Amino acid sequence: MGDRVEIEGSDARKLVTVLRRHTGDRIEVIDSAAQRFDATIEIERRSVFAILSECITAAVEPSTFSISVAQAVPKGQKMDFVVEKLTELGVAEILPFYCERTVPRHSRRDERWQRLAATAARQSGRSTIPAVSIPEDFASILERFSRYDRVLFLWELAERHPLRDRLPQLLSGAYSILVIIGPEGGFSSEEALLAQENGANLISIGSRIVRTETAALVMLAILNYLA
């Protein structure tokens, strides 16, 4: 090995000013192909380099399910939080969308969200970064349903069956899963009916109504437990 790679931007600043690393310190580098390398830092004035020593076998991430989340875009900066936490929990893909009761109509933020996903992936030790798509409308999300083995549509008015009983049977034989999360005001009955007609399973996560930025995290935690 011995390849010398320059570390730039926020990653370099974090190593030097936040983590206070010095020349000779050991780090781990993950490249765009998700390969991991042992490396040594070299700091030359304002430049930071990594000297790669050996390739480490890529970490195996849980593969029982591949989980994508379609999230109705919430108000303010809440989507930033959703992207970061879903990435930490291992989501494969994040699909922001607008529907009947979403309040904001942001200018394009998908590039910012993708950067947040990359940072969260590094922080949590993931070897892959989830894709964050351009926000779509609800009709476009409906058209995606056929790409997944199961679609779970979280709706506070769905029949309340204990998930510990329902999910194992519902997800038997499934690999790709799409979880649909509504806006602050919830999905309308018409939207829930459309989702069901297109093959979604209407799911309640219990008697408590949680915030939109909480719902996906709860569902990911449950699915990770099952995995």
Image (cartoon, rainbow, N blue to C red):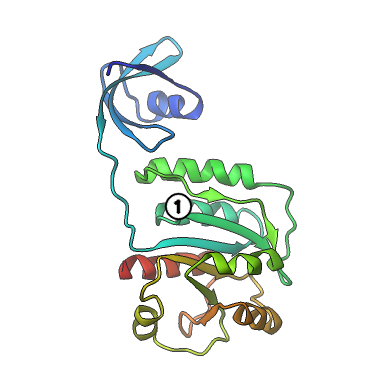
Q: Position of residue 220 (x, y in %)?
A: 42, 65
Q: Position of residue 110 (x, y in %)?
A: 63, 47
> Quick check: 222 above or below 75?
below
Name the residue beneath numbered marker 1: 87
Q: Nearer the viewer, residue 8 or 37?
A: 37
Q: Secondary structure at mark 1?
A: helix
Please state if 79 lies on the left or on the right of 44 as rendered. Answer: right
Amino acid on which disc 1 is placed = Thr
Residue drawn 54% across and 40% down? Answer: 115
For the N terminus, which image quadrant?
Answer: top left
Q: Residues within 10 Å of mark 1 (few under 14, many from 20)?
A: many
Residue drawn 66% across and 74% down? Answer: 185
> Quick check: 196 above or below 39?
below
> Quick check: 21 above or below 192?
above
Q: Position of residue 73 (x, y in %)?
A: 64, 60
Q: Nearer the viewer, residue 227 or 222?
A: 227
Residue drawn 51% across and 55% down? Answer: 93
Q: Residue furthest top?
A: 45
Q: Quadrant of residue 125?
A: top left
> Quick check: 82 above or below 40?
below
Residue drawn 29% across and 30% down? Answer: 37
Please state if 197 lies on the left or on the right of 21 as rendered. Answer: right
Please state if 37 lies on the left or on the right of 180 as rendered. Answer: left
Q: Nearer the viewer, residue 221 or 151?
A: 151
For the C terminus, which image quadrant?
Answer: bottom left
Q: Quadrant of residue 70?
A: bottom right
